Amino acid sequence: MGIALIAFGGFVLLEGVIWACFPAQMREMYRRMMEEVADRDLHVVGLVSVFIGAAMLVYGVKLING
């Protein structure tokens, strides 16, 4: 569990540094990316994220409760 926390923390840290140093470039990159991605693809990715997140929460609760 510690490894996952370190990995996620590193990801959030790196993302934060990039946004802090290059906000205008990041905004432009996200804008261009969103124009190129179809709504259907965003729906699918959103649903997959919901299922993965829910599974992670359930697994985490089971680990805590034993």
Image: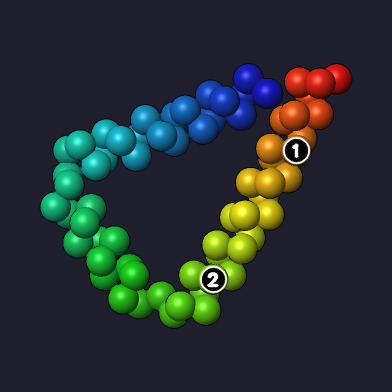
**Label 2 element class:** helix
Identified at 62% across, 54% down, the residue is 50
Q: Quadrant of the C terminus?
A: top right
- Amino acid residing under circle 1: Val
In the image, 65: left or right of 48? right
Most foreground residue, 7 or 66: 66
Q: Which residue is mark 1?
A: 58
* Residue 1 screen position, x and y as percent: 68, 23
Identified at 17% across, 54% down, the residue is 25
Q: Which residue is mark 2?
A: 43
Q: Furthest residue to the right?
A: 66
Identified at 63% across, 60% down, the residue is 48
> Crowdedness of circle 1 by 10 Å Cα count: few (<14), some, many (20+)?
few
For the residues bearing labels 1 and 2, Cβ distance under 8 angstroms:
no
In the image, 8: left or right of 22? right
* Residue 40 screen position, x and y as percent: 52, 79
For marks 1 and 2 on the same chain, the one whose residue lies earlier in the sequence = 2
Instruction: Indicate whether 18 appears above or below 4.
Output: below
Instruction: Indicate whether 51 appears above or below 35.
Output: above
Which quadrant would residue 30 be assigned to in this image? bottom left
- Amino acid residing under circle 2: His
Most foreground residue, 64 or 25: 64
